Image (spheres, rainbow, N blue to C red):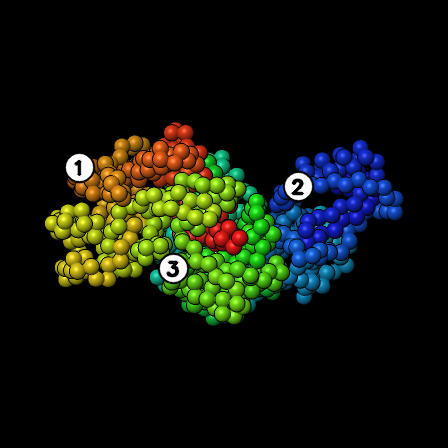
Amino acid sequence: MAAKYGLVGEVDNRTDGVSVIVQGDLKTIDRFSNDILQNAPPASQIKSIEINLTYFTGYDSFKITGSKTINNQITEISPDIAVCEECLNDLGKDPERIDYPFINCTNCGPRFTIIEGLPYDRPTTAMKNFRMCRNCNSEYNDILNRRFHAQPIACNSCGPVYSYKDSVKSIGNIKQILEEISVQIASGKTVAIKGLGGYHLMCDALNDNAVNELRKRKQRDSKPFAVMFRDMNALKNYCCTDETEEKELNSWRKPILILKQSKKLSTPVSNGLNTIGAMLPYMPVHYMLFRILKTEAVVLTSGNISDEPIIIDDFVAERLLKPVADSFLSYNRQIINRTDDSVIKIIDHKPSLIRRSRGFVPRPVDLKFNVEGILALGAEQKNSFCIGKGNQAVMSQYIGDLKNVPTYNFFIETIDRFSGLFKFKPEYVACDLHPDYLSTDYAEVLHNELNVPVVRIQHHHAHIASCIAEHGLDEEVIGISLDGTGFGSDGNIWGGEFMIADLKNFRRFTHFDYIPMPGGEKAIDEPWRMAFSYLHKYSDGKFDYKSLPLFKPIDDKKLLLVEEMLISKVNSPLSSGAGRLFDAVSAILGFCSKASFDSEAPMRLESAIDEDTNDFYPFRITGTIEFADTINAILEDLPRQKVSVISAKFHNTVARVILKVSRKIREETSLNKVVLSGGVFQNKHLLEKSLYLLNRNRFKVFTNHLVPANDGGISLGQLVIASKLRR
Ligand code: ZN
Ligand code: FE
């Protein structure tokens, strides 16, 4: 840009931002700085621009000088950026990069996934072992070139290359590799493909046998598979999209979007849900593959075994994925930072993050106060942690379920990686109130090793705080957290919480009725137990269980055992979790009595919904919120009403509860801002209905957009609460 305006001077990348010195006449400089604001690269984010005037005449050219480290400050590290249009065009015409699958420029390519240290220069990335050829070097140093200072710059003669391997052969030529993979996919095989942030498994999304086989081989994995489509047209053959969804699908982040299915792919892809996790190509190799693939849609699911982290190392992939994949497509550049594909759902025309990883990490959340030195360790499932640097919260990528040993190791490694990258040393540690979370354990380890104070934060307070912080509120609000589970201050399991909260304290206003979970954790995996428990409580133990089809296939002995547990209050912890209510209703309606993946029962319940129903069921607010009338009305509806209608009426009921309690709190406290957070708010129908009702009643409503509403966003909440408690 400076060259375009004929300005001389220098620019450098500093840990506290970008410094530009330009020398020239004021009018031109003015146009130059406006141009920066208006035509900044798509993935950049200019937070503020500060202009200082001085007299200087020492420059005769414009140059980029070396990166500088200032104080203890950090520069933001860019998230990974999907390959850009210009680079895709270059694949056909740049003589050094004809069909070069690692093509990139300053506007696109890998970033976070290849960074080992700061400042972000080639020697601190996974590109350090690739010596630039003469051509790349001259482009890298040519200020007018689109690849000027693009750290991962590479070409056919000097950059990383792909290699293919199956049980009988190896191929090194990219054209032959792609042809071979196309044959494999067409014949129903599964290919393990090294992606940007980890390995993927790919098979034809239109071939039932191929998808079934992949499911079988992946072990216990019945979660819906993500699908990559050839292009937007292909995607629209199978998914309903609106403008916002298309914009997100096409953005430089290229995330997975949960979209409504309009035409079926192979049946096992979505496993009975009416949604498709859809994405578009984002690596050059994806585009190159789709040029010759016969199918317009492939399953592209994480390369891992059941719930383990996505695999990044080639030797681990070859070992662990051998029983899953028929062949391997790898490349000789290391993945430094593991990142999954991010998952987004558009709710109320705005993106709502389900999984925050590639394309988002490690972009910080800006806060209005200092959080330096705080390490927030997050929850247990869908874990992410968060570190405080100045007024910024830097959240890690999606880590996963810590109960899994390799995932726990990934958690520890990533804390170390972030500490190095961001020159971070924990001075104050925040964790969940839950005594048995592994993240809580680790807080104790840090406490003992580093002698740092630890503060334990209630789960749902943290959910609410994550949303308060995102919106820069820092005041008392009506906080509604509907969630699966979270350890409560009274030792019970919480998750249907209505609180008056600010960033420091919270007061529980009311909550969903406590219901015993017969068998403890088992009741989460087997929603029929929750159905049993609700019916037991709301009928005073007089319910005729065999009158419901749900209980017919369940062994009498098991039913009796559950009943005994409930009566004798043994192994039946009390829960106010909204997730458990959704589980019970889903089971009663016959959608899911045993869950084979996380949140399956509520997802099936939502999936079946009839959007056009506005009716709702009765409920009662005494000291707590009781659903006896709701459950009874559902049972009455069951023989004569479509389950899709009952599902809608149930969702509408919960939205009505939210409205009614919000009004009660407003009457008592005159608070008018409602913050909604917790995993249950990833339910599109529930959240949209709640927003509609609350807005119509002139509440100001806030929901999560920068971090997930589920437990993946907890660490941000912990971090901000800890900063308030520290003072
Ligand atoms: Zn590019
Ligand atoms: Fe939670």
Of the residues shown, which amino acid type is indicated by label 1? Arg
Per the image, label 3 sits on a secondary structure element best described as loop
Q: Choose top left, top right, bottom left or bottom right for residue 406.
A: bottom left
Residue behind label 3 places its C-beta within 8 angstroms of ligand 2: no
Could you tell me residue 115's position as x and y percent?
62, 59
Q: Earlier in the sequence, mark 3 or mark 1?
A: 3
Residue behind label 1 places its C-beta within 8 angstroms of ligand 2: no
Is the residue marked by circle 1 packed among few (<14), some (14-19), or many (20+) residues within 10 Å? few
Q: Residue at x 71, y 35 (%)?
A: 34
| Front in this rendered view, residue 432 or 329 | 432
Could you tell me residue 35's position as x and y percent?
71, 37
Location of mark 1 (residue): 640
Could you tell me residue 114's position as x and y percent?
61, 59
Q: Determine whether label 3 and label 1 are within 8 Å by CB.
A: no
Is the residue marked by circle 3 packed among few (<14), some (14-19), or many (20+) residues within 10 Å? many
Note whether residue 539 is visible: yes
